Amino acid sequence: MKETQSATMDAGTAVTTTTRRRLLKGSLGAAATAAAVPSLSGVAAAHFPVEIAIDIQPENAKNFIDLSEHDTVTVAVEQSAFVNSDGDSETFDPTERAVRYRFGSRLALENGEGARPVDDGEIRDPDDGAEDGKASLVLTFPVDEMGLDGGEETGWLYWERDESGAHGYAGFDSVRVYRGQPAGRSLIEQLQRLLGGETGTGAD
């Protein structure tokens, strides 16, 4: 009888110990997950699928930004149609949307930074003979807030759906970013000066 009671107590103790360990393990796991949320929130909370069509420096086909010379940069936001995350067809018309934009490097935008437009922008009618025939919104952004340091080849634009800035749409365009004259241009100008100097000397 005593042996049976002892065995029963041992089994009960084992079950209790195992249950406590599971509870402790579950609690630790939940705590670890909760601790990890803040580190992920900066990336996971902001959701900006690439759906917007933009044109950086619409008046300049080369899309260059000289950090030493340019105080501002213009970006044209064009109308675009796509299927959204709900599976519905959606048209993004910048002339009818709230002006909540940020422009700059992708890293800056993902960190909640980037340049805000200096005003509400200018609605620009399409050129005669344009294929889409739709108006665009041209925005002006201050260069010193874009988070660019030179060498970037892509400029990003985020549109925020609401004041929280947590969700919206993104767009990008190719760009040349440098500080001062680009290396290729400097070399060409140096050669031109050199050849010009030699020619002038020869003429004398």
Image (cartoon, rainbow, N blue to C red):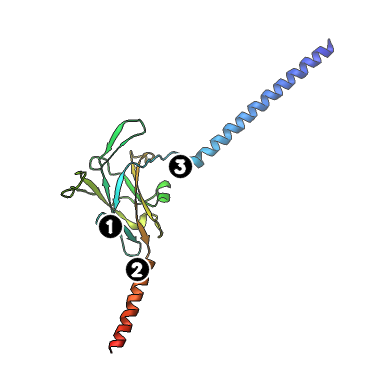
Residue 19, located in which quarter of the rendered image?
A: top right
**Left or right, residue 164 beside residue 135:** right
Which mark, residue 130? Answer: none
For the C terminus, the quadrant is bottom left
The image shows residue 133 at horizontal and vertical percentages of: 19, 44
Which mark, residue 43? Answer: 3
Residue ID at (38%, 64%): 179
Camera-nearest label, 3 or 2: 2
Amino acid identity at mark 3: Val
Q: In this view, does 35 lie above or below 138?
A: above
For the N terminus, the quadrant is top right
Of mark 3 and mark 2, the one earlier in the sequence is: 3
Report the residue marked by disc 2.
185
Amino acid identity at mark 1: Ala
Amino acid identity at mark 2: Arg
Of mark 1 and mark 2, the one earlier in the sequence is: 1
Residue ID at (35%, 79%): 194
Of mark 3 and mark 1, the one earlier in the sequence is: 3
The image shows residue 80 at horizontal and vertical percentages of: 28, 41
Q: Badges 3 and 1: C-beta atoms under 8 Å apart? A: no
Report the residue marked by disc 1.
61
The image shows residue 162 at horizontal and vertical percentages of: 33, 38
Element on which disc 1 rests: loop
Q: Which of 150 and 71 is in front in this view?
A: 150
The image shows residue 117 at horizontal and vertical percentages of: 29, 50
Q: Nearer the viewer, residue 126 or 29?
A: 126
